[in-house]
Amino acid sequence: MTSTVNGSDVKHTTPEGEERPLLEIKDLKVQFTTQEGKVTAVDGVDITLYRGQSLAIVGESGSGKSTTAHAIINLLPGSGQIAGGQIILDGQDISKASKKEMEAIRGRKIGFVPQDPMSNLNPVWSIGFQVEEAIRANGIATGRKEVRARAIEVLKQAGLQDADRRLKQFPHQFSGGMRQRVLIGMGLSADPQLLIADEPTSALDVTVQRVILDHLESLTRELGTTLLFITHDLGLAAERAEQLVVMYKGRVVESGPSLEILQNPQHPYTQRLVAAAPSLASRRITSTIHGQEGAAHETGSEVGTTTDTIDLIATAEARAEAHEAAAAQPPAIVVEDLTKVFKIRGSGDFTAVDKVSFEIPKGTTTALVGESGSGKSTVAKMLLKLEDVTSGKIIVGGKDLASLTGKELFDLRSRMQPVFQDPYGSLNPLRNIGNTISEPLVTHGVGDRASRRARVFELLDQVSLPRTLVGRYPNELSGGQRQRIAIARALALKPEIVVLDEAVSALDVLVQAQILRLLADLQAELDLTYLFITHDLAVVRVIADNVCVMQKGRIVEAAATDDVFENPTEQYTKDLLAAIPGANLQLGA
């Protein structure tokens, strides 16, 4: 039996005797009403899925992939509405279902895992309360003990092994990856027929990502669950989805079996996506970072295709000179025996960071990598003085941060800027994009109104966003667009040090490539120093000079990037490398 995705016949395996599709999307059109009129975000999409199938929708931010997912469950944001077409679930056209009918369908028949964990968890309610509320709402359990037991069970299924201890905690006490696991557990709690996962693992480290995706595959195989997930990770799509849909500007430009498309992409846009993906191309991109022209010549046109998007060869000489200069001067950042202990009500002390030490030479990039909850982001918060240090030292530019107060601390903040993991949580929903980007300039008294506006336009250009976004608000943008705004704001003051906490995890591969190239160019031009925190080891290989691997609050391995990738000494590091999606796939562009 075959299914059809925008005109392409796709072979698949379905249960014996299965004839009727679980999900049919026919000529779907979604529009948003703006000040300029109606904007079509999804234009004529057709998808057919049978029970037990898995399909991934990929494309850049704003391509319509998340809008398609939200249309299925009739939870379009803002002024969005279905303007045409049908969404047929198990024979019923749910695009015309009433509000009450959709409430009965959501959760029980269709599970949903949203992209942004912080904005989808209530900050004033405990994790346990929110998971238990979802379980009761879906009618899975009623008794208090039964509900609690099911809450613990679904969180463990989603990879949160100490779920019983974590139930009393609040969202702000969880790492981004842990918050995402909570949402995954809630989405799976009712064992739905169809699970829609919008970037379900974008905030997760690769080892936990594997646990989650293995679980989703198990559901598909054992329960006949249909899986529709949105992702910008082509390696993940190639490994996990039978079918692939590539969207661009609201339309499907290519579709069919995942491996077939990614090994032999036909549409120019798909070719660009494959060429730009670091998870698929990290090894050949590495040679360009360090200016190893011989290695580049060996791979021929393959490197040429990649460097059209991530052209880091041009900055290799400048970075090499910067490294030589850095060796002759004090490090930009020195961390000595850094420790952070949190006091958790009812659970005693929790050591999040345990005697961590490292140095970052001026003008270079050091990456902190490890699983969610390993302490990476806590190190960043202490460096930015957003968390107090329990013990140890942080020295920036030769000065101990503990001694800085008043104007000295204010001046430091102009020279050291952050980019956080959660763009929606770090952007004020009441400020438009222009005011958001210019906020650091106003705070630090830089320029006049005209020059600040010119700088805002310059920054929008740098992060590949249209200048027309100046008057719009965060809730009107996609997750990737919001993250680009956060990066633009961090670059506004042209800082000496940038602390990037999962700065590209929410971005599609083309924009991710642009941002990584931008960061490399800025580093060479302005002698910037980066602390780059990420769970994406493929990105680490593209951007970092040195790597520190963290596990349970400690650094277990630290070395130059090539050494860590080619000769890892710790089993934990080897496991992280082995879990990179698409690492062993031979995909073409």
Image: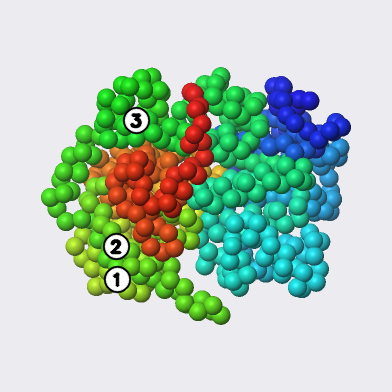
- Rate crowding at label 3 as few (under 14), some (14 to 19) or many (20 or more) other CA atoms within 10 Å: many
Sequence-wise first label, 3 or 1: 3
Sequence-wise first label, 2 or 3: 3
Contact (CB < 8 A) between labels 2 and 1? yes
Q: Between 211 and 19, which is closer to the camera in this rendering?
A: 211
Would residue 228 appear left or right of 427 to someone viewing this image? Answer: right
Amino acid tagged 1: Gly
Q: Which residue is mark 1?
A: 392
User: In the rendered image, which quarter is residue 47 located in?
Assistant: top right
Q: Secondary structure at mark 3?
A: loop
> Measuring 76% from the left and 52% from the top, which residue is drawn there?
191
Q: Is residue 534 above or below residue 342?
A: above
Eye-nearest disc, 2 or 3: 2
Q: Which residue is mark 3?
A: 311
Q: Secondary structure at mark 2?
A: strand
Would residue 523 appear left or right of 145 to someone viewing this image? Answer: left
